[in-house]
């Protein structure tokens, strides 16, 4: 795809590669070490990945997490993928985010990815019935 930024990644940005994936640092990181794992084949929907692509994506995420743990010592990770425009996907080429998290980077990190709907993120506080 001529207009797809993930179909024409500058080779200098690639930090790891498998037969079916490329791993890069996010161009607009939300934390130090924010990484993307991208399949080489152009498709948008995570659920369209072949079994082989899904396996290599998962292995690339594990490898990247291990490397980031050694290099940057994060205290945790968020792993996420946006599937479709309604879910926030803006580049219609599948990419999986690996976001290192650091103690204190948010005042209260509880709820993790649930915070996309902040009013629903807090499931631990008792509510009147």
Image (cartoon, helix red, strand yellow):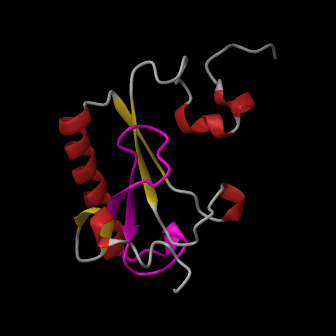
Whole-percent x, y for residue 11 in the image: 29, 71
Residue 113 lies, with reference to residue 96, above or below; the image says above
Q: Seen in the image, is 45 located left or right of residue 20?
A: right
At 35% from the left and 43% from the top, the residue drawn is: 33
Whole-percent x, y for residue 66 in the image: 21, 44
Q: How many marks?
A: 0
In the rendered image, is residue 122 in sight?
A: yes
Q: In the orientation shown, which residue stands out farthest toward the right?
A: 129
Whole-percent x, y for residue 26 in the image: 43, 53
The quadrant where residue 90 appears: bottom right
At 66% from the left and 15% from the top, the residue drawn is: 125
Residue 61 lies, with reference to residue 106, above or below; the image says below
Which quarter of the rendering shows the C terminus?
top right
The quadrant where residue 58 appears: bottom left
Whole-percent x, y for residue 79 in the image: 43, 46
Asked if the stretch drawn in magenta spans residue 35, the answer is: yes
The quadrant where residue 115 appears: top right
Report the span colored magenta: 23-51
Residue 47 lies, with reference to residue 64, above or below; the image says below
Asked if the stretch drawn in magenta spans residue 61, the answer is: no
In the rendered image, is residue 55 in sight?
A: no
At 58% from the left and 67% from the top, the residue drawn is: 91
At 44% from the left and 78% from the top, the residue drawn is: 7
Q: In the orientation shown, which residue stands out farthest toward the bottom?
A: 2
> Viewer-proximal residue, 98 or 50?
98
Q: Seen in the image, is 93 located left or right of residue 64?
A: right
> Viewer-proximal residue, 114 or 104?
104
């Amino acid at each position: 795809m001529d207009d797809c930024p993930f179909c024409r990644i500058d080779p200098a940005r690639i930090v790891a590669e498998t037969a079916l994936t490329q791993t890069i640092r996010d161009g607009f990181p939300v934390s130090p070490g924010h990484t993307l794992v991208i399949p080489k084949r152009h498709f948008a929907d995570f659920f369209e990945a072949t079994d082989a692509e899904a396996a290599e994506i998962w292995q690339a995420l594990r490898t990247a997490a291990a490397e980031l743990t050694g290099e940057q010592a994060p205290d945790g990770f968020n792993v996420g993928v946006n599937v479709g425009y309604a879910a926030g996907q803006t580049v219609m080429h599948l990419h999986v985010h690996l976001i290192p998290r650091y103690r204190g980077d948010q005042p209260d990190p509880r709820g993790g990815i649930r915070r996309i709907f902040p009013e629903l993120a807090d499931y631990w506080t008792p509510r009147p019935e």
